[in-house]
Structures are given as structure tokens and as C-alpha cells.
Image (spheres, grey):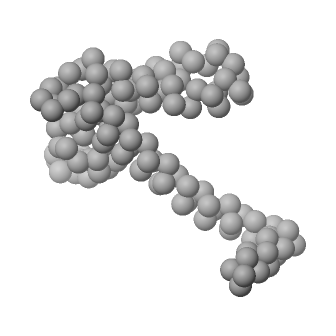
Amino acid sequence: MALSNRWAERQASAVTHPASGLQVFGISFLLYIPMVFVLEEVFFRGALDTYARGPHLANDRTLAVFVSLLWGVWPLPLVVAVSGLTQLPIILGFHLILGLLLTFPWRRSGNLAVPASPTRSSTRSGMA
């Protein structure tokens, strides 16, 4: 009960003070983006890619393309609701390229943090 009272007080202060609303937005945004990233990486690269490759863990590029395109279809209901199917080729192309760039480092290292940290990878290889 005390928690809901605090939440109600915070919402009331956000209405009277616009800066408080921006603060709530900023905190929510900073929490939401990493959570979505972690969920998508763990599902698409950690679970789906590993499951599709099977126990032999072949380095099959066709499966990498399939999983990347499937990753592009993931936001499709939102895209269709906003702009119809006109944006589909752009979205699939973007997710295909980005998905392949994230899949191959993950497959080489076996660590989901590697595709998430290109700065660390470039520093380690002497590029930065």
C-alpha cells in the first residue's frame, strides 16, 4: 500500500513539474533499452541460433541468414500497423545485415556479450 501511495505521489508531481516527467521518461528509457536488447540477444542468438544449428554446431551461413531475417520479422506487427508493408524490404535488409554482423562474432566466441561490445573487440584486436 505504501508503494502505491508513493507511486501516486510521484505521478502527481510529474503532472505539476514537467522536469519530473522527463526524469521518469529518462529512467524508464534507460531501463527499457538494455532489457529489450538482452531479451532479443538471448532469444535470437543464444537460444534460436543454437537450436537451429543443432548439436554439431555447424557454421552454416544459411541458418545465420534465416535467424537474421526472422529477427527482422519480429517487429512486423508494429510496422504494418504504422506504415503497412511498404517498409518491409528496408526492415528485412537492415536486420539481415545487422543480424549477420552480430551472429558471426557470437558463433566464434560463444559469448553473447561479444556482439554487444564492438568497442571491446576492436580494442582487443588493436584497431582502436
Viewed as shown, does residue 45 lie left or right of 17? left
State the residue at coordinates (38%, 41%).
Answer: 43
Viewed as shown, does residue 1 lie left or right of 107? right
State the residue at coordinates (58%, 26%).
Answer: 76
Quarter residue 19 falls in? bottom right
State the residue at coordinates (39%, 30%).
Answer: 98
Residue situated in front as seen by the camera: 33 or 49 = 49
Residue situated in front as seen by the camera: 114 or 42 = 42
Residue situated in front as seen by the camera: 44 or 123 = 44
Question: Please, is residue 38 above or below residue 86 in the view?
Answer: below
Residue 42 x, y percent position in the rendering: 36, 45
Q: Residue furthest left?
A: 56
Count of residue discs: 0
Residue 126 visible in rendering: yes
Quarter residue 63 falls in? top left
Q: Residue furthest bottom?
A: 2
Quarter residue 102 falls in? top left
Residue 94 visible in rendering: no
Residue situated in front as seen by the camera: 89 or 118 = 89
Residue 82 x, y percent position in the rendering: 72, 27
Image quadrant containing the N terminus: bottom right
Question: Please, is residue 71 above or below residue 118 in the view?
Answer: above
State the residue at coordinates (54%, 19%).
Answer: 90
Residue 77 x, y percent position in the rendering: 63, 28
Residue 92 x, y percent position in the rendering: 48, 21
Viewed as shown, does residue 29 lie left or right of 117? right
